[in-house]
Amino acid sequence: MPIKKTPAKKVASKAVTKKVNSKEDSGTPLSVVIRRRIEAQKARFHANDNISAFIKPGELEGLVDEVAEKMQAVLESLVIDTENDHNTQNTSRRVAKMYVQEVFNGRYVDQPTLTKFPNVSRLNELMIIGPITVRSACSHHLCPIMGRIWIGVLPSKESALIGLSKYSRLTEWVMCRPQIQEEAVVELADMLEKKIKPIGVAVVMDADHFCMQWRGVKDRDSKMINSVMRGAFLKDSNLRREFLALIDRK
């Protein structure tokens, strides 16, 4: 008895229907699913943006799997014999975990909790935190940016205060993304202003850029130093000089 075959067109039609009816089709790459959620909210997802609001619990592990698969293709395109080279057999997964869970982790996890305390003693003296170690990456070449940050805060009597370790945690969260130094320092200053509401805030960053030292001009002595001054630090030249003189000693 001849086997009855389903017409090819009908099979294709069913497959299309299934894909359209599924909100987040299981066959779609996870990165595409996350991208669609972001685009549906008309949100931005540049290299230095945090997209944790669009990632569901457990999905970071799936993202590591996807990045590892694509990184394997990159290694193969670089003509590296990962099958027989014992040093690179698991490199694709190591790199994927490094990007998602470590060096770009500030894109994928929520902002650290910042416990705030009332300024009971009504402090209004200059506070300096630093140097805080910075590890970031240039969004142009994904080369490391390694450096230090100093934060100056002049609280008002009404300002909130946060624990010293929170400055480091917030700095790390902002810096663990591909970006350019100029934008990173501004973003950190914005967050501190919003959270603490001080009279003034200052941020200075001094960093080595491997996109200049490792490639390109290969100038190992070049650094980039930039600063952001807000409120009293911008208006009061004496306060600004005091801050810069004190961090120069460290």
Image: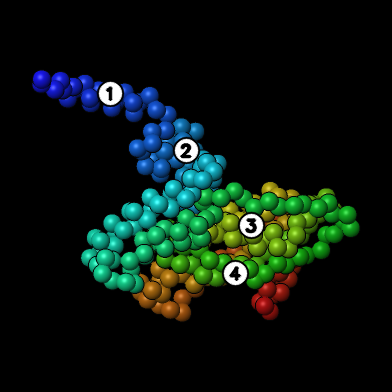
Does 142 sit above or below residue 221? above
The residues bearing labels 4 and 1 have C-alpha atoms spaced at a distance of 55 Å
Mark 4 / mark 3, whichever is N-terminal? 4
Amino acid type for the residue under numbered disc 3:
Leu
Q: Position of residue 178 (x, y in %)?
A: 46, 57
Mark 2 and mark 1: Cα distance apart in space? 28 Å
Q: Amino acid at mark 1?
A: Lys
Callout 2: helix, strand or loop? helix
Rendered image quadrant of residue 147: bottom right
Of tags 3 and 1, the one toward the viewer is: 1
Pick whichever, 2 or 81, lies toward us.
2
- Of callouts 3 and 2, the N-terminal one: 2
Residue to which mark 4 is pinned: 133
Q: Nearer the viewer, mark 4 or mark 1?
A: 1
Q: Which mark is residue 82?
A: none
Q: Quadrant of the C terminus?
A: bottom right
The residue to which callout 3 is attached is 170
Q: Percent x, y for residue 20?
A: 35, 26
For label 1, the residue is: 14
The secondary structure type at the circle numbered 3 is helix
Q: Dot 4: what SS?
A: strand
Amino acid type at mark 2: Ile
First reached walking from the N terminus: tag 2 or tag 1? 1
> Mark 4: few, some, or many residues within 10 Å (few <14, many ≥20)?
some
